[in-house]
Image (tube, coloured by chain):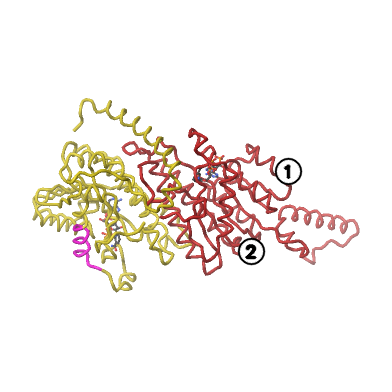
Chain colours: A yellow, B red
Amino acid sequence: MTKPHDDNEQSHVDRREFMAAAAGMAAAVLAAHETNAAGHASTPANFAPEDRVARPVSAGSRILITGANRGLGFEFARQYAELDTRIIATCRTPDKATALQELAADNPGIVIEKLDVTDLENIDELATKYAGEPIDVLLNNAGIGGGAENQIFGKLNYPVFFEVMSVNVVGPIKMCEAFRKNVEASNLKKMITVSSSQGSIAEVMMPMLYWYRSSKAAVNMQMVNLALQMRRRKVIVGLVTPGATATDFIPEPFRSRIPSIRQPEVAAADMMRNIDRFTLENSGSYFNYDDTVLPW
Amino acid sequence: MISKLPRKGIDRIRWLLVVSVSGLLLAMLLPAVAQEASEDLPYIPTVLITGANRGLGLEFTRQYVDRGWRVIATARRPDAADDLNALAEKHPGLVIIEQLDVQDFDVIDALSEKYADTPIDILLNNAGINGGARNQMFRKLQYEAFDEVLLTNTIAPLKMSEAFYENVLASQQKKIVTVSSSEGSIGGATQPRLYFYRSSKAAVNMLMVNLALQLKRKGISVGMVNPGPTDTDFMAGLPKSMLRSPTDAVADMIRNIDGLNLETSGTFWQYDGTIIPW
Ligand SMILES: NC(=O)c1ccc[n+]([C@@H]2O[C@H](COP(=O)([O-])OP(=O)(O)OC[C@H]3O[C@@H](n4cnc5c(N)ncnc54)[C@H](OP(=O)(O)O)[C@@H]3O)[C@@H](O)[C@H]2O)c1
Ligand SMILES: NC(=O)c1ccc[n+]([C@@H]2O[C@H](COP(=O)([O-])OP(=O)(O)OC[C@H]3O[C@@H](n4cnc5c(N)ncnc54)[C@H](OP(=O)(O)O)[C@@H]3O)[C@@H](O)[C@H]2O)c1
């Protein structure tokens, strides 16, 4: 994938980008007032007709999933496999991922790779291994909640905050950095992150999950930036949410306290439908499982 | 203790001396407590400010002390804080300088122990860093910088709130305020930049909204303010004509802080009093 003039282009782009950032900052300073008063200020970008067409995942599409061994990640792998896609199913400990191994045994389109998203070198190594291979959908699914007991005001467990940030925020943006060229070289060109409605600041009704919530608000911010950044390269960036789902993520006794809890099959299918909805035009949106757009 | 009181004349004098000197020291160390004890004096509100040595923090100190408030002005390096020291000299007893690096949670805890029993009307989380634009360019993200930014801008304000919660609760105004930034508005982003800084401010907004709900029942209100682009070291390099003066920025934020109450708790204010969308 490395082109001969790549380094040159890289530093050139960096400089240009830095200047653009500085200029952007200055412009923002001037526009600060209007932008904020207007609420949401969308860039009046010019989209070509094809930029408005939603292109769904289909047979042959290549998808990379993080945390594919259980929960929603596994369900993504299972349902995408049914569409005859080619899947790079990553997980921290492939040896122990028996369900995923069985799935892969039945589906030659699935390749299992070892990946801990907090290990940035591990991410780079995997990206090197796949250099030159297009990836249609980069699906950042791996995430942790951090344990409700560590996020109670009065006995906040601060080291856990950094663990949560490293899996839920650094992991996804680093994946996007490392696999940028793979996605750019693909047909669908999507970078999707599984966020959570808990990341919506506007929808906070009860104080809880300080770490988890701020990690999802933070990753939302990163992905909105990335959507703006990748627009001219035609890469689509999206945020999806599953709704409260019965995975290990919501253990008992919490699970039975949520009457509206959904099954992983349904939650993954809902997110897949929303992933298909993304276009360059709506890139950067925060799609809830029920097809509505969540407020930030 | 009583039985050990010295009885002989000379001992008694020495004892009295010890008592009165330590009483004096106590009065000097804990002016708030001393002041509260004498009921004739009017209540002097107290604000604790982080990063009070320069920029907006220094200006906050200046304006609150001009209002007759007592300011616990914290700084990482008090000996190097010339402007702040000068201000403290000018207003003895009203500007109290304390050493505090908000990244050091042990020091936060020690300071809160030192001030146990001192009511703090406003806890003002002002200290913040932008992390350097060069560290936050996609494809060259420097993740160590992200940790620094999160620690200072996101987590420290919550840790401060946790540590000084009792002090705020014991005060009259009962306010916790964080200087956020319109860069933290996710819906307001129109150009990609400052990945870390922006997400640190979005994240602290989320924390403070949770805290607002958490502390409402206790009568504590929690707010976020934004100075707008202001001429401090923070914006070094940008043309001054584009920037607001710290005097105006702080006067505006103080006006918003004055308007903060239990009903408006959890609001994120633009300097002009409008509300910034998340
Ligand atoms: N379930 C819900 O109600 C719900 C609601 C909103 C959003 N979400 C989001 O949905 C996503 C998936 O959650 P889930 O419900 O499927 O949770 P889950 O059942 O707990 O599964 C979490 C997955 O993430 C993986 N993971 C954790 N840390 C990792 C790391 N450092 N590197 C690589 N993989 C790691 C886990 O791998 P191991 O098996 O190795 O631990 C596991 O595969 C998360 O981003 C979560 O925030 C879930
Ligand atoms: N200026 C603007 O245009 C603008 C716009 C929006 C928001 N803000 C926010 O306003 C706040 C104040 O910014 P400013 O413009 O006054 O910036 P500044 O002039 O750069 O001052 C930053 C202050 O924060 C202190 N600080 C940094 N890290 C610290 C730490 N670990 N512990 C304790 N203090 C620390 C600095 O202390 P040292 O002197 O020891 O470094 C300094 O006192 C920040 O939260 C910033 O995000 C500023």
The residue that disc 2 covers is B172
Could you give the CA–CA distance between mark 1 and mark 2, rounded to whole angstroms? Answer: 26 Å
Residue drawn 29% across the image and 40% down it? A121
Q: Residue A38: x, y in percent?
A: 40, 52
Q: Please tell me in which quadrant of the rendered image residue A26 appears.
A: top left
Asked if residue A271 is among those painted magenta in the image, a careful observer would answer yes
Residue B136: mark: none
**Left or right side of A4 for A219:** right
Which element is circle 1 on?
Answer: helix
Q: Residue B201: x, y in percent?
A: 44, 49
**Left or right side of A60 for A10:** right
- Please state, as top left, top right, bottom left or bottom right, where the C terminus of chain A lies in the image: bottom left
For badge 2, the amino acid type reads: Gln
Asked if residue A241 is among those painted magenta in the image, a careful observer would answer no
The residue that disc 1 covers is B90
Q: Chain of mark 2?
A: B
Q: Please tell me in which quadrant of the rendered image residue A74 appears.
A: bottom left
For marks 1 and 2 on the same chain, the one whose residue lies earlier in the sequence: 1
Q: Please tell me in which quadrant of the rendered image residue A175 appears.
A: top left
Residue drawn 42% across the image and 64% down it? A208
Q: Residue A92: x, y in percent?
A: 25, 50
**Left or right side of B266 for A192:** left
Which element is circle 2 on?
Answer: loop
How many tags in the picture?
2
Boundaries of the magenta span? A262-273
Relative to A149, residue A123 above or below: above
Q: Nearer the viewer, residue B20 or A254?
A: A254
Q: Residue A95: x, y in percent?
A: 20, 52
For badge 1, the amino acid type reads: Lys
Q: Is mark 2 within 8 Å of ligand 2?
A: no
Q: Nearer the viewer, residue A82 or B126?
A: B126
Q: Chain of mark 1?
A: B
